[in-house]
Amino acid sequence: MILKVTLLLATLSLVRAKDATYELILSDSALIAACKEPAPGRLNIDGFMDLSEISTTLNEHGVVLAGNVTFVWGIQPQDRIKAVIKLLYLDRGTWTPTFYTVTSNDYCKSMYDSRLPWHTYWLRHVTNYEDVKDKCISPGTKLILETYLLSLAMTLPKLREGFYKVQLTYQAFDANGTERPTNICFEILGDLQKV
Ligand SMILES: *[C@@H]1O[C@H](CO)[C@@H](O)[C@H](O)[C@H]1NC(C)=O
Ligand SMILES: *[C@@H]1O[C@H](CO)[C@@H](O)[C@H](O)[C@H]1NC(C)=O
């Protein structure tokens, strides 16, 4: 099955007027994969959140998401979270970084910042924002999502068409700055085509 997903990162400050819009076409029914490179303490998306109450359906416009997610990563509520989103390009068999990287050294401060991509994709669809806005990704926090079309569109300076992945990593640090023993890494793979 070919899922057509338009990646929408349009609110990023690095967008310029001459930029083109690209469409990420996912060639697999699994939107999300585990990171391939092994690392100590690495967990995939199942270690990050419980997706069993999320449903995805395909219509002619793309993927429709509905339901809710619950964070399950065993961190402490006061931990500082570092989050990194990277876009990588498959260049003759080697994953190569692109200029596109978003790093947040204190994710909980910027989690609901409307300029950041995780907000564009899904956090702006959280309906119980008032209940969860101070809980960040503490384990047990449940985000209730309105039913929405997953519109992941990317307006970026010139990129080559080809095979890409968006890799998301999260690390947690205690009050002394010591990293917690587990970290999260997962990725979304697909063909990027100009639209
Ligand atoms: C979470 O999603 C499930 C499945 O869609 C639903 O049955 C349940 O009522 C939802 N829970 C809340 C609190 O919205
Ligand atoms: C931070 O370090 C101090 C001194 O080594 C220690 O007493 C405290 O328990 C540490 N706090 C955490 C959260 O590990």
Image (spheres, rainbow, N blue to C red):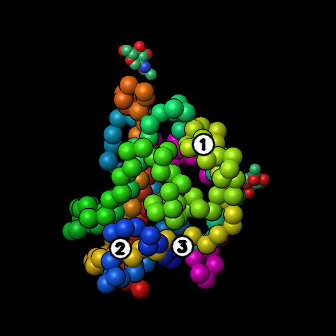
- Is 189 a magenta residue? no
Pick whichever, 163 or 124, lies toward us.
124
Disc 1 element: loop
Residue 95 picture location, percent across and down: 26, 61
Q: CA distance from mark 2 to mark 1?
A: 30 Å
Region rendered in magenta: 42-62
Q: CA distance from mark 2 to mark 3?
A: 17 Å
Q: Mark 3 and ligand 1: say if the CB distance to the nearest ligand atom is below 8 Å.
A: no
Q: Mark 1 sits on what residue?
A: 134
Q: Mark 1 and ligand 1: say if the CB distance to the nearest ligand atom is below 8 Å.
A: no
In which quarter of the view is residue 18 placed? bottom left
Residue 132 picture location, percent across and down: 64, 46
Is 62 above or below relative to 126?
below
Q: Mark 2 sits on what residue?
A: 15
Q: Mark 3 sits on what residue?
A: 151
At 47% from the left and 72% from the top, the residue drawn is 8
In which quarter of the view is residue 20 placed? bottom left
